[in-house]
Image (cartoon, rainbow, N blue to C red):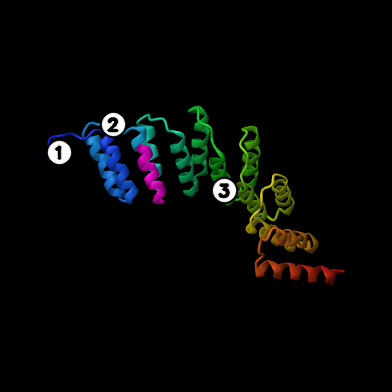
Amino acid sequence: MKKAAVSPNSITYNTLIGGFCDAGYLDKASNLLDQLKSNGLSPSLVTYNILIEGYSKAGNWKGVADLAREMEGRGISPSKVTCTVLIDAYVRLQDMEKAFQIFSSMERFGLVPDVYVYGVLIHGLCMKGNMKESSKLFRSMGEMHVEPSDVIYNTMIHGYCKEDNSYRALRLLGEMEAKGLVPNVASYSSIIGVLCKDGKSQESEVLLDKMIELQLKPSASILNMISKAKKFTELKI
């Protein structure tokens, strides 16, 4: 194009940047962004979204964060897609403060967080062991008329099991069943593990029966835990 004395416009650059991102050539895509700016053109929201999604797919979360800062510096308001990818990036970078800043800004931009956004944030909080905040966010979903998915329930159950809170984990399990959602093997296994640890062999056997009823295959370690808990209970009697 340059040889023919035709200057590429923003649409051309976006198309080329998108092509390089899809092919995984992020360095070339980044070079084109620099070239776009040096030619007196301004990157648009579309340009940044293409790059942010490209970096996200490559797992380059630092690159995503850098692009977000550049966008902010240029006064470009993010779209819902941008916010979703940014929240995911900051959670993966374990920067929950920044993730929640983006989450809060969505309302300011008139954007409504969906179940995926809530799931990403809840996962990040649970991984950090912050069950108080994850529970608060989980309950706020109802107020926003966003129905928690089975993935979110399973994440919460796993989080409570990590802190040996079988009561809250079982309560969420009951909620799932009432809504017709099926807990995964990991959720049942986690709760059974905590119940066995607490010496509640009968309760763990009830859950084992439910697993079998749902055609979920318990692992050998779970069966072994239940067997040991049962023997321990019998010895106490």
**Residue picked out by circle 3:** 123
Residue 211 in magenta stretch? no
User: How crowded is the residue under tag 3: few (<14 C-alpha within 10 Å), some, or many (20+)?
Assistant: many
Q: Is residue 63 visible?
A: no
Image quadrant for the C terminus?
A: bottom right
Q: Dot 1: what SS?
A: loop
Above or below — where is 25 with respect to 86? below
Q: Amino acid at mark 1?
A: Lys
In the shown orientation, is residue 95 left or right of residue 22? right
The magenta region covers: 48-61
- Residue 38 lies, in percent from the top left, at 22, 36
Q: Amino acid at mark 2?
A: Ser
Position of residue 59 in the picture relative to residue 32 (left or right): right
User: In the rendered structure, which amino acid carries the disc numbered 3?
Assistant: His
Image disc number at residue 42: 2
Q: Quadrant of the N terminus?
A: top left
Image disc number at residue 219:
none
Q: CA distance from mark 3 to mark 2?
A: 36 Å
In the image, is 45 to the left or to the right of 229? left
